[in-house]
Amino acid sequence: MLSLVIAEASLELVPKELQHHNSVVSHARKMGKRPSEILLDNSWHFGAMKGIKNEIKRGRPDLVHFCLLEACTIPLYFEDEVSVYVHTLDDKVIIVEPGVHLPKSYHRFAGLMEKLFAERVIKSDGQKLLEIKNMTFSDLIDKIKPENVIGLSSEGTESSYHDAAATCTSESCLVVGAFPKGDFSDSVKKRIDSLLSVDANPLEAHVVIARVLYEYEKTVFM
């Protein structure tokens, strides 16, 4: 089946160096959790994040939520025609098992991700739903073993949603970044075979995922 990798995703727990900042401590207290147990979120932790490494690509877990909802609520996913992975900026990989129904509410999604970071595996009735592993993007590509890796970026060669989808087969890996600003790191780019730009405008990742998967879906179910 087609593999979708949501790459360098802006999804992480508050790092150790920020856990004593007032904004983080205050937010954690409101959530009834320790600072080390909550997601780094620019909406709440803007002051704490000023000047941290890779600042422009961090603190937007909501982008990952949007991307996962677009990828996991379509016929392509429910018919097991696409597998979904989230690779984070700090080299963790979330494996989304087939048929998972993710929370529509961001508050519940954030709580689920915090639980996943803590427990490493989420199960229901003994069935694995989500799992997180320490893994680089390159390691993930080696695990998937796709016949080609297609990255979508405004920095890529001019293309279209239809043409990008037409390059995909059931053995392809489609890569979309889930970070607010910037571009793929060199370590990700070197594993991408074709880097394509599907729109003249820089669009949010979830919009790109929705449109390209829809075009690909038409080739599967036509």
Image: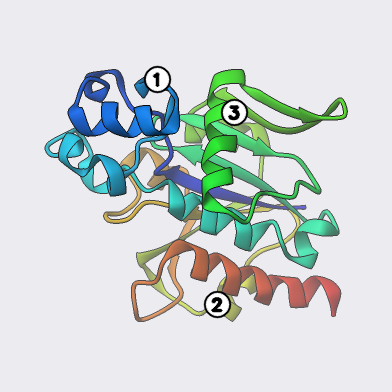
Q: Is residue 83 visible?
A: yes
Residue for badge 3: 116
Distance, label 1 to label 2, CA atoms, is 43 Å
Image check: 210 left or right of 218? Answer: left
Mark 1 near mark 3, Cβ–Cβ under 8 Å? no
Q: Please rate how many residues cluster around mark 3, counting C-alpha atoms within 10 Å: few if below 14, some from 14 to 19, many from 20.
A: some
Q: Amino acid at mark 1?
A: Arg
Question: Which quadrant holds residue 126?
Answer: top right
Residue for badge 2: 161
Residue 11 image offset from top left, x and y in percent: 43, 39
Question: At 65% from the left edge and 50% from the top edge, which residue is drawn?
Answer: 103
Closer to the observer: label 2 or label 3? 3
Query: Looking at the image, what colour scheme do you see?
Result: rainbow
Q: Secondary structure at mark 2?
A: helix
Residue for badge 1: 34
Q: Secondary structure at mark 1?
A: loop
Q: Is residue 174 visible?
A: no
